[in-house]
Image (spheres, rainbow, N blue to C red):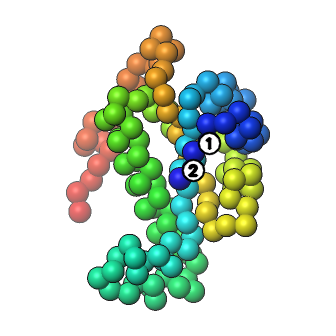
Amino acid sequence: MTTDKSQEGKERLAKSLKDKNIDKMMAAPVTAIIAHDLEFWRYLPFLFPHEDRRPYFEGKPEHSETTAFRNGTLQGAYFMIAARALGLDVGAMSGFSNAVVDEEFFAGTTLRSNFLCNLGYADEAALFQKLPRFPFEQACNYA
């Protein structure tokens, strides 16, 4: 994850956004870029010292990318829950070009963007009310 609350950073990020999202991002005090590292497995001896799991990922880019994306998404969700627990409003956004974000902020690295997340205190009048949700039985299944 990277955060950039500077005007320059926001202008760089705005290049990637769909028109309807530009004003939302520019008005937010902070926008986090939730990303994942395609070579996360290089850090496994530190992050998971119980067993060397690098062989499960080294030389297996498809498996590494799927795992990095899944785990990065989960970490992004935890980030949003933590921000909300602190009383912040959170606005996740997917209306942007990942390719532009990756070029602007992660060129030359193994990081890839997943989604954006605006943080701050929203104008209550501009917020959507809770949207409809499917009942559990329609959205879930047991194995």
Q: Give the residue at x 35% y 28%.
A: 87
Q: Quadrant of the C terminus?
A: bottom left
**Spot occupied by residue 31 in the image (x, y as percentages of width and height):** 57, 38
Which residue is painted at 43% across and 62% down in the image? 71
Q: Identify the mark at residue 4; answer none if there is no mark.
A: 1
Q: Secondary structure at mark 2?
A: strand
The disc label shown at residue 24, or none: none
Where 87 falls versus 125 (above or below)? below
Q: Measured along the vertical axis of the image, is residue 137 above or below residue 142?
A: above
> Which three-letter amino acid code belongs to the residue tagged 1?
Asp
Residue at left 55%, top 74%? 39
Q: In the rendered structure, which amino acid carries the disc numbered 2?
A: Thr
**Picture coordinates of residue 73 (x, y %)?**
46, 54
Asked whether the residues under the numbered discs 1 and 2 touch, taking CB atoms below 8 Å apart as contact, a structural biologist would say yes
Task: Name above or below for residue 69 compared with residue 27.
Answer: below
- Mark 2, residue position: 2
Q: Residues within 10 Å of mark 2 (few under 14, many from 20)?
A: few
